[in-house]
Image (spheres, helix red, strand yellow):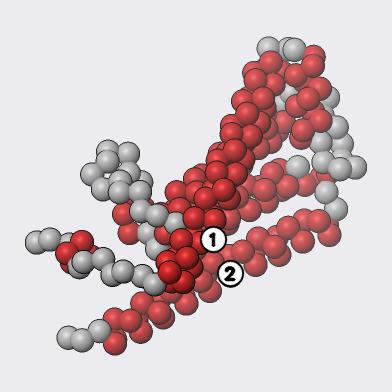
Amino acid sequence: MSDPLHTIPPHKLSPLNNLIFMSRWLQLPLYLGLILAQGVYVFHFWVELVDLIGAAMGNPDSLQHIFDAVTAPNGIRPTKLNEVTIMLVVLGLIDVVMISNLLIMVIVGGYETFVSRMHLEGHPDQPEWLSHVNASVLKTKLAMAIIGISSIHLLKTFINAHSYTDKVLIAQTVIHMAFLFSALAIAYTDRIMIGTQNATKPH
């Protein structure tokens, strides 16, 4: 059975409507900018990874950079590369990867949803979530990605809790809970909208 979206002849738009519709391409430089930001994160990841490997091999410059990276403001500076220090650096690397994943979802999903179809159907590397992406799905996935990033930050803080005040610990926990409730609210709202749409469809 053919796709009805491809059997309907294209409707000729008026010049004004065509101009308004073409304005979506103004978002293209924004997505290209996010691709450059992705490149910066890749560079940052490898710098941190090289420093971690260098520190493990006893390179003094790498050790100093690692200690600078994991020392909280007004916190106790590590004196050696121990398990906690390595864990904080690795969590930082995971944080970069998760933010990079978030960027990919925004770039690919946002371009597909708001700018132009990419026609990836049948491509072996097509993301599973992209086959049914829309503004609602993208919004929910972004909320879940932000919760994951917030969880990594919160875990890093708790591991290094002695370097933070109670006020900072409570504030970060409250912010994380706010992200959780926001995601639940978004998911609940989408569920209501889908239920309403299904109820109004003719049987």
Q: Earlier in the sequence, mark 2 or mark 1?
A: 1
In this image, 195 relative to 7: left or right? right
Q: Residue furthest front?
A: 15
Instruction: Determine if residue 58 is in view.
Output: yes
Q: Please say whether residue 87 is visible from this viewpoint.
A: no
Residue plotted at (77% across, 20% down): 63
Number of marks drawn = 2
Residue 7 picture location, percent across and down: 17, 64
Amino acid beneath label 1: Ala
User: Disc 2 versus disc 1: distance between alpha carbons?
Assistant: 8 Å
Q: Looking at the image, do the residues carrying marks 2 and 1 touch, with CB atoms under 8 Å apart?
A: yes
**Residue 47 drawn above or below residue 97:** above
Q: Amino acid at mark 2?
A: Ser
Taking the spot 63% from the left edge, 29% from the top edge, the residue there is 43
The residue indicated by pointer 1 is: 143
Say if 137 sits above or below 130 in the image.
below
Which picture quadrant has residue 134? bottom left
Q: Does residue 153 sit above or below 63 in this rendering?
A: below
User: For this rendering, which residue is in front, 125 or 188?
Assistant: 125
Report helix, strand or loop for mark 1: helix
Q: Which residue is mark 2?
A: 182
Residue 101 x/y as whole percent: 51, 44
